Image: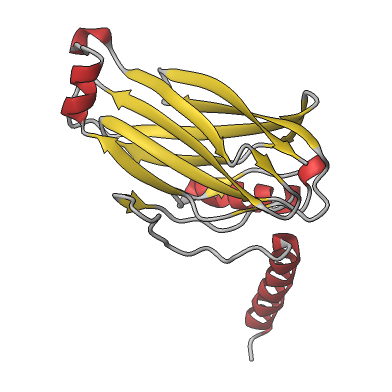
Amino acid sequence: MPAQWLKNRLLMAAFVSIFTVTLLGGCASTVEEHPGATSGAVIGAVGGAVLGGIIGHQVERKEEGMIIGAILGALAGATIGHYAYDVKRSRAETASLYSYKPTSGPLIRIEDVAVIPRVVRPGEKVDLQATYAVLHPDPDARIGIIEIREIRRNGVLIGRPSVKVVRTGGTYTSVVPLFLPANARPGTYTVITTIDGGIARDTRETTFTVE
Protein backbone atom coordinates (compact mmCIF):
# COMPACT_ATOMS: atom_id res chain seq x y z
CA MET A 1 0.00 0.00 0.00
CA PRO A 2 1.67 3.31 -1.06
CA ALA A 3 2.69 5.54 1.84
CA GLN A 4 1.10 8.65 0.22
CA TRP A 5 -2.25 6.85 -0.17
CA LEU A 6 -2.22 5.86 3.51
CA LYS A 7 -1.30 9.39 4.54
CA ASN A 8 -4.22 10.83 2.52
CA ARG A 9 -6.66 8.37 4.10
CA LEU A 10 -5.49 9.30 7.61
CA LEU A 11 -5.85 13.02 6.87
CA MET A 12 -9.36 12.45 5.54
CA ALA A 13 -10.33 10.46 8.64
CA ALA A 14 -9.07 13.27 10.88
CA PHE A 15 -11.07 15.85 8.91
CA VAL A 16 -14.25 13.80 9.16
CA SER A 17 -13.80 13.48 12.93
CA ILE A 18 -13.41 17.25 13.34
CA PHE A 19 -16.38 17.91 11.04
CA THR A 20 -18.62 15.50 12.99
CA VAL A 21 -17.79 17.06 16.34
CA THR A 22 -18.31 20.58 15.01
CA LEU A 23 -21.80 19.79 13.72
CA LEU A 24 -23.00 19.56 17.34
CA GLY A 25 -25.76 17.18 16.45
CA GLY A 26 -26.88 18.98 13.27
CA CYS A 27 -28.23 17.25 10.16
CA ALA A 28 -26.10 16.35 7.18
CA SER A 29 -26.36 18.28 3.93
CA THR A 30 -29.29 17.11 1.85
CA VAL A 31 -31.64 18.43 -0.80
CA GLU A 32 -35.11 19.06 0.52
CA GLU A 33 -38.20 20.74 -0.88
CA HIS A 34 -39.78 23.27 1.43
CA PRO A 35 -43.51 22.39 1.75
CA GLY A 36 -45.33 24.39 -0.91
CA ALA A 37 -42.11 25.68 -2.40
CA THR A 38 -41.61 26.18 -6.09
CA SER A 39 -38.06 24.98 -5.63
CA GLY A 40 -35.59 24.26 -2.86
CA ALA A 41 -31.86 24.41 -2.30
CA VAL A 42 -29.32 22.49 -0.37
CA ILE A 43 -28.28 22.97 3.10
CA GLY A 44 -26.81 21.32 6.13
CA ALA A 45 -26.33 22.48 9.67
CA VAL A 46 -23.96 25.24 10.70
CA GLY A 47 -22.77 25.31 14.28
CA GLY A 48 -19.63 27.11 15.42
CA ALA A 49 -16.82 29.13 13.94
CA VAL A 50 -14.70 26.20 12.76
CA LEU A 51 -17.41 24.70 10.57
CA GLY A 52 -18.35 28.13 9.29
CA GLY A 53 -14.78 28.61 8.09
CA ILE A 54 -14.55 25.19 6.43
CA ILE A 55 -17.82 25.58 4.56
CA GLY A 56 -16.90 29.12 3.56
CA HIS A 57 -13.99 27.84 1.48
CA GLN A 58 -16.16 25.18 -0.17
CA VAL A 59 -18.79 27.70 -1.19
CA GLU A 60 -16.32 30.04 -2.79
CA ARG A 61 -14.91 27.26 -4.94
CA LYS A 62 -17.71 24.99 -6.02
CA GLU A 63 -20.94 25.07 -4.01
CA GLU A 64 -23.95 27.28 -4.59
CA GLY A 65 -26.77 27.45 -2.10
CA MET A 66 -24.70 26.35 0.90
CA ILE A 67 -25.24 28.28 4.12
CA ILE A 68 -22.02 29.62 5.61
CA GLY A 69 -21.21 31.51 8.78
CA ALA A 70 -20.78 30.94 12.49
CA ILE A 71 -23.23 30.83 15.39
CA LEU A 72 -21.54 32.04 18.57
CA GLY A 73 -22.04 33.53 22.02
CA ALA A 74 -25.61 33.45 23.30
CA LEU A 75 -26.57 30.98 20.54
CA ALA A 76 -23.46 28.78 20.60
CA GLY A 77 -24.52 25.28 19.68
CA ALA A 78 -27.43 26.40 17.49
CA THR A 79 -27.80 24.69 14.10
CA ILE A 80 -29.20 25.72 10.75
CA GLY A 81 -31.74 23.54 8.97
CA HIS A 82 -32.65 23.23 5.30
CA TYR A 83 -32.74 26.46 3.29
CA ALA A 84 -35.72 26.74 0.95
CA TYR A 85 -37.43 29.36 -1.18
CA ASP A 86 -40.72 30.04 -2.93
CA VAL A 87 -41.19 32.06 -6.11
CA LYS A 88 -43.88 34.50 -5.05
CA ARG A 89 -44.19 36.50 -8.30
CA SER A 90 -42.80 36.18 -11.83
CA ARG A 91 -40.53 38.81 -13.35
CA ALA A 92 -43.42 40.31 -15.32
CA GLU A 93 -45.61 40.53 -12.22
CA THR A 94 -42.79 42.04 -10.17
CA ALA A 95 -41.92 44.60 -12.86
CA SER A 96 -45.58 45.62 -13.10
CA LEU A 97 -45.89 46.00 -9.33
CA TYR A 98 -42.89 48.33 -9.18
CA SER A 99 -43.60 50.12 -12.49
CA TYR A 100 -40.08 49.06 -13.38
CA LYS A 101 -38.24 50.49 -16.38
CA PRO A 102 -34.93 49.04 -17.66
CA THR A 103 -33.41 52.53 -17.54
CA SER A 104 -33.76 52.35 -13.74
CA GLY A 105 -30.97 49.77 -13.57
CA PRO A 106 -30.88 46.73 -11.26
CA LEU A 107 -33.35 46.69 -8.39
CA ILE A 108 -33.37 44.74 -5.15
CA ARG A 109 -36.17 45.47 -2.70
CA ILE A 110 -36.89 43.67 0.56
CA GLU A 111 -40.66 43.59 0.94
CA ASP A 112 -40.88 41.83 4.30
CA VAL A 113 -38.79 40.08 6.93
CA ALA A 114 -40.12 37.94 9.76
CA VAL A 115 -39.05 35.54 12.47
CA ILE A 116 -41.66 32.81 13.03
CA PRO A 117 -42.59 32.43 15.82
CA ARG A 118 -41.65 35.75 17.39
CA VAL A 119 -41.48 34.27 20.91
CA VAL A 120 -39.66 30.99 21.47
CA ARG A 121 -38.11 28.88 24.21
CA PRO A 122 -34.60 27.40 24.31
CA GLY A 123 -34.35 24.25 22.22
CA GLU A 124 -37.11 25.31 19.83
CA LYS A 125 -36.92 26.42 16.18
CA VAL A 126 -37.45 29.80 14.54
CA ASP A 127 -37.71 30.43 10.80
CA LEU A 128 -35.77 33.46 9.53
CA GLN A 129 -37.88 34.54 6.58
CA ALA A 130 -37.33 37.20 3.92
CA THR A 131 -39.42 38.25 0.90
CA TYR A 132 -37.60 40.31 -1.72
CA ALA A 133 -37.85 41.46 -5.32
CA VAL A 134 -35.04 41.21 -7.89
CA LEU A 135 -35.12 43.01 -11.27
CA HIS A 136 -32.51 43.63 -13.95
CA PRO A 137 -32.68 45.53 -17.26
CA ASP A 138 -31.88 42.26 -19.07
CA PRO A 139 -34.95 40.02 -18.61
CA ASP A 140 -32.76 36.91 -19.04
CA ALA A 141 -30.08 37.98 -16.59
CA ARG A 142 -29.02 35.61 -13.81
CA ILE A 143 -28.11 37.68 -10.76
CA GLY A 144 -25.72 36.48 -8.08
CA ILE A 145 -27.31 37.17 -4.68
CA ILE A 146 -25.95 36.88 -1.16
CA GLU A 147 -28.64 36.60 1.53
CA ILE A 148 -27.14 37.66 4.86
CA ARG A 149 -28.90 37.33 8.20
CA GLU A 150 -27.01 38.93 11.09
CA ILE A 151 -28.22 37.91 14.54
CA ARG A 152 -27.45 40.27 17.41
CA ARG A 153 -28.19 40.27 21.14
CA ASN A 154 -27.67 43.49 23.09
CA GLY A 155 -25.93 44.85 20.01
CA VAL A 156 -23.35 42.05 19.93
CA LEU A 157 -23.05 39.97 16.76
CA ILE A 158 -23.60 36.29 17.64
CA GLY A 159 -24.48 34.78 14.27
CA ARG A 160 -24.21 35.53 10.58
CA PRO A 161 -25.61 32.74 8.43
CA SER A 162 -25.54 33.65 4.75
CA VAL A 163 -26.26 31.88 1.50
CA LYS A 164 -25.13 32.46 -2.09
CA VAL A 165 -27.80 31.91 -4.73
CA VAL A 166 -28.48 32.86 -8.34
CA ARG A 167 -31.81 34.52 -9.13
CA THR A 168 -33.61 35.56 -12.29
CA GLY A 169 -36.05 38.47 -12.13
CA GLY A 170 -38.99 37.97 -9.77
CA THR A 171 -40.07 38.02 -6.14
CA TYR A 172 -38.85 35.35 -3.74
CA THR A 173 -39.55 34.25 -0.18
CA SER A 174 -36.65 32.39 1.43
CA VAL A 175 -36.46 30.67 4.79
CA VAL A 176 -33.49 29.76 7.00
CA PRO A 177 -34.56 27.58 9.96
CA LEU A 178 -32.59 28.19 13.15
CA PHE A 179 -32.66 25.48 15.84
CA LEU A 180 -31.85 27.09 19.18
CA PRO A 181 -29.61 25.30 21.69
CA ALA A 182 -31.16 24.09 24.94
CA ASN A 183 -29.12 26.70 26.83
CA ALA A 184 -29.98 29.69 24.61
CA ARG A 185 -29.89 32.84 26.72
CA PRO A 186 -33.18 34.65 27.25
CA GLY A 187 -33.69 38.11 25.80
CA THR A 188 -34.48 39.98 22.61
CA TYR A 189 -32.54 39.04 19.48
CA THR A 190 -32.33 41.31 16.43
CA VAL A 191 -32.11 39.80 12.95
CA ILE A 192 -30.71 42.18 10.31
CA THR A 193 -31.39 40.81 6.83
CA THR A 194 -29.40 42.07 3.84
CA ILE A 195 -30.02 41.02 0.24
CA ASP A 196 -26.90 41.94 -1.72
CA GLY A 197 -26.78 41.71 -5.51
CA GLY A 198 -23.41 43.41 -5.93
CA ILE A 199 -24.54 46.69 -7.50
CA ALA A 200 -27.86 46.80 -5.65
CA ARG A 201 -28.78 45.81 -2.10
CA ASP A 202 -31.39 46.34 0.60
CA THR A 203 -31.50 45.81 4.38
CA ARG A 204 -34.28 45.39 6.89
CA GLU A 205 -34.46 44.17 10.49
CA THR A 206 -36.83 42.41 12.85
CA THR A 207 -36.63 40.76 16.30
CA PHE A 208 -37.55 37.65 18.21
CA THR A 209 -37.59 36.86 21.91
CA VAL A 210 -36.21 33.86 23.79
CA GLU A 211 -38.07 33.36 27.05
Which residue is outermost to the bottom?
1
- The mark tally for this picture is 0
Q: Which residue is drawn at 29% across and 40% down?
A: 87
Q: Which residue is drawn at 59% across and 42% down?
A: 117
Which residue is outermost to the top?
103
- Position of 87 with respect to 101 (left or right) is right
Quarter of the rendering containing residue 172: top left
- Position of 154 with respect to 192 (left or right) is right
Nearer the observer, 11 or 114:
114
Position of residue 42 relative to residue 100, above or below, is below
Quarter of the rendering containing residue 94: top left
Residue 22: image location, x then y, percent: 74, 60
Q: Which quadrant of the figure contains the C terminus?
A: top right
Q: Which quadrant of the figure contains the N terminus?
A: bottom right
Quarter of the rendering containing residue 107: top left
Nearer the observer, 188 or 40:
188
Residue 70: image location, x then y, percent: 69, 44
The answer, for residue 137, to whether it is visible in the render is: no
Residue 205: image location, x then y, percent: 58, 23
State how the image is colored: secondary structure
Position of residue 132 relative to residue 200, above or below, is below
Position of residue 201 relative to residue 37, above or below, is above
Q: Residue at x 23, y 18 (%)?
A: 97
The answer, for residue 125, to whether it is visible in the render is: yes
Q: Which residue is drawn at 71% across and 78% down?
A: 10
Residue 122: image location, x then y, percent: 76, 50
Nearer the observer, 25 or 103:
25
- Position of 137 with respect to 29 (left or right) is left
